[in-house]
Each structure stands twice: as C-alpha cells, then as structure tokens.
Amino acid sequence: MIGMHFFNPAPAMKLVEVVRTVLTADDVHATVREVCATVRKHAVDCGDRAGFIVNALLFPYLNNAIKMVQEHYASLDDIDAAMKLGGGYPMGPFELLDVVGLDVSLAIEKVLHREFRDPGLAPAPLLEHLVAAGCLGRKTGRGFREYAKR
C-alpha cells in the first residue's frame, strides 16, 4: 500500500509526495519513485499523516495569515506584499487561498485540527464565514478579493 499526493494543477506542479505506510513493500516504493521520474515529477517520501509535508506546513501559515486580518493586525494586501517581498514567496497567502479555494482550504484546516488536536490549528472563523457565504475564491468570483467574472 502506498500513496501519491499530486499538487494542483498536476501538469504544472513538479512535486509528488510519496506516502509510505507500514504496509509498503520496498519494490512498490521503488516502482512508484520510478513512475514519478518517468513523468518528470520530483518525488519526496513522507509518512502517512494529515497534511503529509506541504499541507502540514502550509495551512497553519495560511490560517495564521487569516487570523492576522481577522484581528486587524494587518491588511491582506500588506500581508501578501510582506510574504512576497520579504519572505520570497511567489504568491501571498491570500492570493494562494483564493486560487486553492476557500472550501478546499477549510476542509484541510479541519483535518489538521482534528488529527493533531492543537487549538492553534482551529480554522479561523473568518474562513468559515466566507465559505458559508459561498465566497470560495477565484472559482466563484469572490474570496478574500473580488474577481471579474469570465
């Protein structure tokens, strides 16, 4: 048994998290890594836990950014600019949230919170309110920002 976590959009994103379990045979693992190389993906190994590597690190960061806006600590524009210009990120957290989808982000936050039972991982209420209002990001024309309808 093995898992492969591709990132969206899969054709453009180069990373695949290869999820090994106690039931993963070495030959299966080797085959999956070969498949990743064949399709020009960079494979990283990780254990089977909520968020794997990327989402376990990324979504607490995104959730904290939402909490900063919610608590009027900084504006979303300033947070996006700070993380792009000061942190070297290609997108600010609110740009990324609106691309990923607020509903998808909320679902990931809930899984992380449920598995690790860390109060700091509880989804920001602002995220929950936006999702409940149907503001899901670019796909609906409104998330943390408004977008022109196509």
Image (cartoon, grey):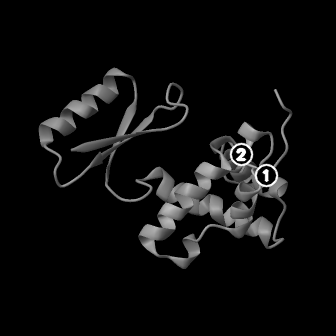
Q: Residue at x 37, y 22 (%)?
A: 39
Please provide percent x and percent y for residue 84.
72, 48
**Can you tell which mark lies on residue 144?**
1
Check disc 2 and report the residue beneath it.
98
SS for tag 1? loop
Above or below, 37 against 92 in this view is: above
Say whether disc 2 or disc 1 marks the residue closer to the N-terminus: 2
Q: Nearer the viewer, residue 31 or 105?
A: 105
Q: Is residue 88 visible?
A: no
Within-10-Å neighbours for mark 2: few <14, some 14–19, many 20+: many
Within-10-Å neighbours for mark 1: few <14, some 14–19, many 20+: many
Above or below, 138 against 59 in this view is: above
Could you tell me which quadrant the C terminus lies in? Answer: top right
Please provide percent x and percent y for residue 65.
70, 62
The amino acid type of the residue labelled 2 equals Asp
Cβ–Cβ under 8 Å for marks 2 and 1: yes
Please provide percent x and percent y for residue 74.
82, 65
Above or below, 5 against 51 in this view is: above
Q: Is residue 75 visible?
A: yes
Q: CA distance from mark 2 to mark 1?
A: 7 Å
Task: Say left or right for 146 vs 65.
Answer: right
